[in-house]
Image (cartoon, coloured by chain):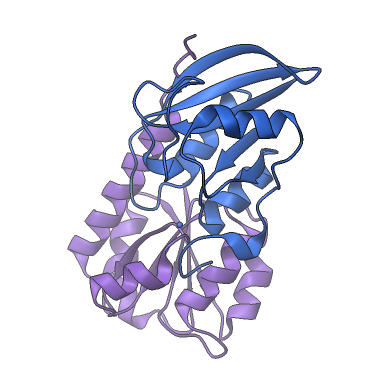
Amino acid sequence: MTIVFIAKDFSRFSVLVDRLKQEQDVELVPVATGAAGLEKLTNKPLDLVIVDEQLDDMSGIEFVKQFVNVNPLANTAILGSLPDGEFHEVTEGLGVLMQLPPQPGKQDAENLLAVLAKISGLLATPTPKANP
Amino acid sequence: MIRLAIPSEGQGGLDGMRAGHFGHCDVFTCIDVEDGQIKEVSILANKEHVQGGCMVPVNLLAEAGVNALVVGGIGMRPLMGFRQVGIDVYHDGVRPEIRPVVDDFLAGKLPQITNDQVCGGGGN
């Protein structure tokens, strides 16, 4: 499983990245702009993109709005601090796994891995035969 | 052959009711169409809905050989996912019954959903 982390600076994310690296292939993509990140990730086979709250040219939420058009099969998570209701409202339809806090910790990594494992399990479950 | 899927409540079937949110539906009513005629109707159980798990139903329907879907609403990510796996997504946001929507599909009267008709902030 490949996880890509889009941000300008990864210093706030060392705990999260270290924990994810114990389980998954984690690629850190240092980009200043969302446009650069979108160019790098268009149609790239990957399982999860984690994007920072703010890039130079767009927010993490705006990045995901554009990202789903170029790579809808990849899961996403966004760093941020919006109240739950507001986060749900602004990301509805985008299929974002979760919002991570601006400085994510080990438990956030565990929560993220648990959701990924759940979805992977559902995707791997054989399709039941359609019954008449 | 076209295999059309309709997100459905309960046990589904042509005389059943549509589900408003495809990701949360109980089953998919699948209608096989050849030469404009219904050849077979089958029922496909949905899988558990998980926040962010938009690709679960996309994968489910693709593996079941579905190539057309009618929704009342859909988010941008699952819409793009369905398109990527070759499933055409049609829109009827009004009628709750399955049969009249299928009849309109067979008559070529249902439009494909457009990007500006997607639900939510991202355009579920």
Chain B, hue in figure: blue
Residue B90 in the image: x percent, y percent?
A: 64, 44
Q: Tell which of A11 and B80 is nearer to you.
A: B80
Residue extending farthest left:
A107
Question: Residue B123, can we see it?
Answer: yes
Does B21 sit left or right of A19 as displayed? right
Query: Which quadrant of the view contains residue A101?
Result: bottom left
Question: Residue B62, can we see it?
Answer: no
Residue extending farthest right:
B35
Q: Tell which of B76 and A124 is nearer to you.
A: B76
Q: Quadrant of the N terminus of chain B?
A: top right
The number of callouts visible is 0
Q: Which residue: 60% across, 70% down? A: A66
Residue A105 in the image: x percent, y percent?
A: 21, 69
Q: Tell which of A43 and B74 is nearer to you.
A: B74
Q: Quadrant of the C terminus of chain B?
A: bottom left
> Height in image: A126 above or below A90?
above
> Height in image: A104 above or below A3?
below
Q: Which residue: 23% across, 55% down? A: A110
Query: Which quadrant of the view contains residue B31?
Result: top right
Residue A71 in the image: x percent, y percent?
A: 61, 57
Chain A, hue in figure: purple
Does A88 sit left or right of B112 as displayed? left
> Height in image: A117 above or below A81?
above
Q: Tell which of A61 and A121 is nearer to you.
A: A61
Q: Which residue: 57% across, 89% down? A: A57
